[in-house]
Image (cartoon, rainbow, N blue to C red):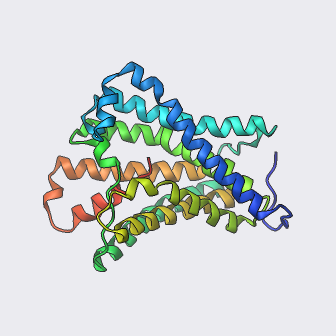
Amino acid sequence: METPSHSEPRDGAPLRSTFVAIGLTVFGLLMSEFAMLPAFLVDPALLDVVANGSLGDASIGGRTLLLILNFVGMALAGVIYLFATDRGLSWIDFRVPTRTDWKYLIGGSVGVIVFLYAISILFMVLDVPAAESQVMDIIGENQTMILIMIFIVFFFNAPAEEFLFRNVIQKRLYAGFNRMQAVLVTSTIFALVHLPMYLIAETMIATLASLTIMFGGSIIFGYLYAKTDNLLVPTAAHAVLNAFQFTMLYLAIEFGIDEAGTAPSLLFEAVATIPL
């Protein structure tokens, strides 16, 4: 099914579209939780670890399986919705990138990294802290887990989140909003989904700072999808960003950069914004 052109007027109900988007988000979260259940059967020790709130103490295999199933469940929610509404797999905008797509992909990948570090510097200048997410707990002190996370973000994290939030939710919002409005609504929902990850922050300012970074990144990914109608473009940009963050973290730990001045602050604040 083709998406409307950029100039085509929308006659859908904005409120209805928004409620559908929120419902899809909740459904995606529930499916993620349900999909992770087999991981606890494979590695029963995960139950105790999760109950104690220290996932970093679990085995690498257990953590890896848990994360992969989490994102598989999220993607499955989008697929179920497409078939339940008779949209089918033809609704998925996935194709070999054109020359224009490549321009947006490269520009978006560079742009989102620049945005991340520019806003991190701004927060440092203003002495605004960024809340640390569950990512650091998942990684623990194991550098091998960081390398595994790079694999996960390329093949599971970015594809699942971009498919659900861009190709399903944002595209569904086109029925009630113009494209840029749909990007804003989707990004607001995307940021709020990550609110529980940052509520552990010491201050509300830290939580809002991290959500602002999450919102800004989502705006960029949503814009890339709105301009190209190719899911591969925001997915690749998302994966490049997350892989870059984990690579910087790996290098920081490997070479002891975390013991230096301002560099580690930028590194770890950036990693704290990785969506999981």
| Res 232 visible | no
Q: Quadrant of residue 213?
A: bottom left
Residue at the bottom extreme?
126
- Residue 240, image x, y percentages: 45, 51
**Name of the residue lying farthest toward the front:** 51
Q: Position of residue 40 (x, y in %)?
A: 40, 25
The quarter of the displayed image where residue 4 is located: bottom right
Image height of 154 relative to 103, above or below:
above
Question: As rendered, which of 157 and 26 lies closer to the eye?
Answer: 26
The quarter in which the N terminus is drawn is: top right
In the picture, measured across the screen, residue 27 lies left or right of residue 144, that is right
Residue at 31% from the left image edge and 74% from the top image edge: 128
**Residue 90 is drawn in which quadrant?**
top right
Indicate the position of residue 265 as horizontal and vertical percent values: 24, 64
Does 216 sit above or below residue 197? below
Spot occupied by residue 92 in the image (x, y as percentages of width and height): 71, 42
**Residue shown at 46%/23% (left/top)?**
38
Report whether 226 appears left or right of 105. right
| Depicted 179 relative to depicted 143: above or below | below
The reply to whether residue 255 is visible in this rendering is: yes
How many callouts does the rendering have? 0
Q: Who's the residue at 70% across and 59% down the image?
A: 18
Measuring 70% from the left and 56% from the top, which residue is drawn there?
19
